[in-house]
Amino acid sequence: DIQMTQSPSSLSASVGDRVIITCRASQSISDYLNWYYQKPGKAPRLLIYATSNLQSGVPSRFSGSGSGTDFTLSITSLQPEDFATYYCQQSYGTPYTFGQGTKLEIK
Amino acid sequence: QVQLVQSGAEVKEPGASVKVSCKASGYTFTDYYIHWVRQAPGQGLEWMGLINPGAGSTSYAQRFQGRISMTRDTSTNTLYMELRSLRSEDTAVYSCARDRGGIVKSMDYWGQGTLVTVSS
């Protein structure tokens, strides 16, 4: 199975900050990388698909980049609703594994 | 609008089976794959497999092979996920999610989740 490792596991930031979350794959996955966010008790929400494509309705302060094994999710100008847990997920090969999550908390 | 509505919470004893349903609406049922994902309490997301509702073909994560079945009913636009030989470690919220389509598989619409508790 392809292992996905996110860093950091948790992160404290303030409204208006810029944050970067990284995701590393155990082998090359080309651009087959998606990002989701999840609030407690809610279903995950797709933010970015295929590394850098913003899902419809997602604010432009979210962006993604990378290729091969190293990927980043960037959030500029954090808003109160952005404090949640973020997951990366690869869909290069089954099983489509997720990272362990990055919990973004308010400082 | 796209909606995936799942069946209600279940409590099962170890060794039993559970069948979770996911009723789709708001789009052409046979045009989009459906994934099943679970999340144990306080844990991350785990992909279980997917089904092509058009052909009925499936792909399961190896770790569930032999005790999982994903099926669909095209007359009611409903998907089903059955997990057998349940153990306490299977206690989790089980969710169906629609594949967005395209070359890179991703999940754009999710059901509300179904809590399955395995306990004696």
Image (cartoon, coloured by chain):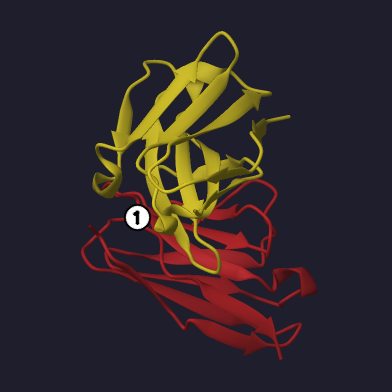
Chain colours: A red, B yellow
Tell me if I can see residue B102 in this picture: no
Q: Which residue sits furthest top?
A: B75
Disc 1: which residue: A31
Q: Residue at horizontal 43%, vertical 16%? A: B54
The percent coordinates of residue B112 (x first, y second) are 66, 44
Neighbourhood count class around disc 1 (C-alpha, 10 Å): few under 14, some 14–19, many 20 upward: many
Residue pictured at 32% horizontal, 22% vertical: B57
Q: Residue furthest front?
A: B120
Label 1: chain letter? A
Is the residue B57 above or below the residue A54 in the image?
Answer: above
Give percent across and percent down for residue B67.
31, 38
- Viewed as shown, does residue B107 lie left or right of A57? left
The residue positioned 40% from the left and 49% from the top of the image is B47
Q: Which amino acid does label 1 sit on?
A: Asp
Q: Nearer the viewer, residue B111 or B94?
A: B94
Q: Residue B4's x, y, as percent?
A: 64, 33
Q: Position of residue A3 (x, y in %)?
A: 28, 65
User: Is B44 above or below relative to A20?
Assistant: above
The mark tally for this picture is 1
Give left or right: position of A75 versus B61.
Answer: right
